Amino acid sequence: MKPVLPFIANPTYPFTAQWIDALQRAMPDERIVPFDALDDAARATCEVAIVANPRPEDLRALPALTWVHSVWAGVERLVNDLGETDLKIVRLVDPQLADTMAEAVLAWTLYLHREMPRYAAQQAQRRWEPQEYLRPQHKTIGLLGLGALGEAAARRLLDAGFKVCGWSRSHKTLEHVDCYAGDDELPVMLRKCDIVVCLLPLTPQTTGLLNASTLSLLRKDASLINFARGPVIDDAALKDALDRAALGHAVLDVFAVEPLPEDSWHWRHPRVTVLPHISAPPDRGTASAIVAANIRRYRTNGTIPDAVNLARGY
Ligand code: NAP
């Protein structure tokens, strides 16, 4: 008899069937079922579940649950919803996801570096105004967050010829990357960046990290890319900086409320590019293979992969 392995997502999540299909193909020895299909015996005995933003009450209905494997890299909502808990939360760490994010970081960095928003605005006004060109070697890209995604992005930017610096909580040593750490060193880094790319997890410490005070450290022709989570940026402070032209441009892929409401100021702001949370969608094939390997190891010898540090929030 195959063990039952629930896939638990919010009922409004549109891709449950696709995930179950991909996970089932990666784990033929398991029976992957949605939460609603669990009978009482399975609910009482299941120790592990795969999750995509589940309702916390669904997890609490599984008394033997020891750990959950998220199919997403960002798990802040789950960490928040569960509060104090013994449940271990394992997030997705997938080199393919990091590669996709690195591609997005390079793409939108080039978009800003080659001044595409400015030339689009000039075209709309039929203005023929070539701007001065600076090679990537003269541009500094600052990465907020040097984790799985930040490191991959740093390598891709270096390959493209940019100068790269990065900021993390603990000190890092990455070849050719000017590394900064901790709150004290953030201003030093922000002052030297042409483009700042946010790849931080959302935690109590990173909420509102880019606020009136930190944004004021950026040069007025600097730009911002947010591929992390909306609330890392204080939205009112960002609007104010853009309105005053104290910041060049913001590429925003993530927002406090998603989908971004129709009446939101971001849609029409000339210094904002809105993206619908597309910078790095997980690849269901590679993610399922990683989840499968972790589940197989657990079934074989009880090993649970490294879990999120709940005190730190990531
Ligand atoms: P990660 O491996 O956990 O790395 C997080 C990085 O942020 C680490 O370098 C960490 O420092 C740093 N950090 C955390 N808190 C900090 C603080 N208070 N001050 C300074 N640095 C801090 O995470 P990841 O896999 O790279 O993913 C990052 C985030 O990207 C996810 O949490 C998710 O929200 C977002 N994401 C977005 C998309 C999208 O499509 N938009 C897709 C995937 C992920 P240490 O190295 O010292 O720990």
Image (cartoon, helix red, strand yellow):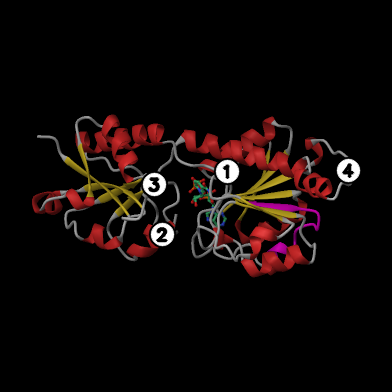
- The kind of residue tagged 4 is Gln
Mark 2 or 4 closer to N-term?
A: 2
Q: Are marks 3 and 4 in contact (CB under 8 Å)?
A: no
Q: Is the C-beta of the residue carrying label 3 under 8 Å from the nearest atom of ligand 1?
A: yes
175 vs 167: above or below: above
- Specify whether 53 is left or right of 131: left
- In magenta segment, residue 274: no
Tell me the SS state at disc 3.
loop
**Residue count near mark 2 (Cα–Cα under 10 Å), binned few <14, some 14–19, many ≥20:** some
- In magenta segment, residue 222: yes
Q: Is the C-beta of the residue carrying label 4 under 8 Å from the nearest atom of ligand 1?
A: no
The x, y position of residue 187, in whole percent, is 71, 59
**Residue at numbered disc 2:** 77
Distance between the alpha carbons at the discs numbered 1 and 2: 21 Å
Q: Is the C-beta of the residue carrying label 1 under 8 Å from the nearest atom of ligand 1?
A: yes
Mark 3 or 1 closer to N-term?
A: 3
**Residue count near mark 4 (Cα–Cα under 10 Å), binned few <14, some 14–19, many ≥20:** few
Q: Nearer the viewer, mark 3 or mark 4?
A: 4
Distance between the alpha carbons at the discs numbered 3 and 4: 44 Å
Q: Can you tell which mark lies on residue 222?
A: none
**Residue at numbered disc 1:** 150
Tell me the SS state at disc 4.
loop
Q: Nearer the viewer, mark 1 or mark 4?
A: 4
